Image (cartoon, helix red, strand yellow):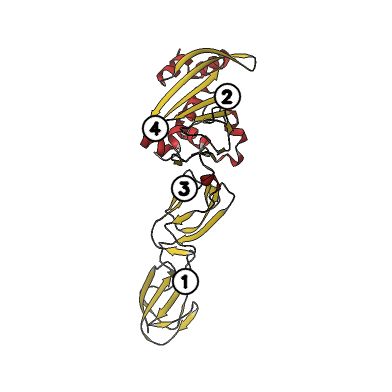
Amino acid sequence: MKRQKRWLIVLAMAVVLGCAGCGMEETIIVNPDLSAQAVVNYYTTSQEEAAVAKELGEGYTYEQLMEEAGCTYLGTEERDGTVHNVYQSTQKMSRADSKDSFVVLTQDQAVLDIGGFEEIQKEILGGEDFPNSLKFLNTEDITVKVKYPFQVYKTNGILQEDGCTVFYPLNTIKNKERIYAVRTSKCAKTGTCTIKGVKNNGCYRKIKTVKASSGGVITSFRVNNESQPENEYTAVKDGVYKVKVKMLTGSTKTVKFTVDRTKPQTNIKAKTYSGKVKITFKDKTSGIKKATLNGKRIKSGKTVSRAGNYVLKISDKAGNVRTVKFSIV
């Protein structure tokens, strides 16, 4: 399971089950050994439950739906002047699962990604059209509460009196990408990071994984301006990639690289031509490094008319080579 999804799936599943814009609260308790427990409370009115039951049909009740999902009914609670039924789901996570769910989780900092919430809801629903009465809940209706195993020095949430618990109303989180808490000023004030796996302006003819690490807090990891749920990314497709890392201090680091696993293109075929031949070639991804005809460098557009046997060899900047043998009579 990808990082960030384990705790978000608990939340998104609750939204799909709750099917109402009444507010969600998830509490994550991180233990000293970095194992954790995620508890989700979600709220529905009797009218909303009736609407869901109607969509389910065949005498299927909302309560049955929640019970089958492993949720417990806690009773009622008044919210904004309206009585709501309260349900709760709980998931315990081992240290390994917990660390995998966070972008970063150490004794000095914790970072969670919240960017993929709507996508996960769609995954849960299998991409099917869902009844309009069972609408998605967006992040503006969600509050995440995290209790950390350390005293929090800095956070983008609302620190509580105990110094360890932070409220994150997700509608207040800038860019809605990551929430974080930091234990020490040293960690919060570290603005440098290391990017490994590729070199700036490098060209590669194989799949590449780029990773960012830091003793400070990485608040954003973007590839081609798209936020990523981890501090790493694997470039599978041919193309140019721009990786931008932003730190809590505001400093940034950018690396560009190209993945090109495709040989250069040419109009020349492995056959015999009659009369003169104009040789053209190109490489749209990494670009042409050099081309030779019988060992001598040429440029695209070269015309050859002399009879004989020829070997055209074209190399791109990523190291892909296309060799074509042809003849002119």
- For disc 2, the marked residue is 23
Which dot, 4 or 3, sits closer to the camera? 4
Q: Earlier in the sequence, mark 1 or mark 3?
A: 3
Rounded to the nearest whole Å, what is the CA distance between mark 4 and mark 3? 21 Å
Residue in the image at 65% along x and 14% along y? 81
Q: Quadrant of the N terminus?
A: top left
Assess disc 3: are there few (<14), some (14-19) or many (≥20) residues with their C-alpha within 10 Å of its C-alpha: many
Rounded to the nearest whole Å, what is the CA distance between mark 2 and mark 3? 30 Å
Q: Earlier in the sequence, mark 2 or mark 4?
A: 2
Quadrant for residue 289, please give it.
bottom left
Q: Earlier in the sequence, mark 1 or mark 2?
A: 2
Disc 1 + disc 2, Cβ < 8 Å: no
- For disc 4, the marked residue is 35
Label 2 element class? loop
Disc 2 + disc 3, Cβ < 8 Å: no
Quadrant for residue 296, please give it.
bottom left
- For disc 3, the marked residue is 231
Q: Which amino acid does label 4 sit on?
A: Ser
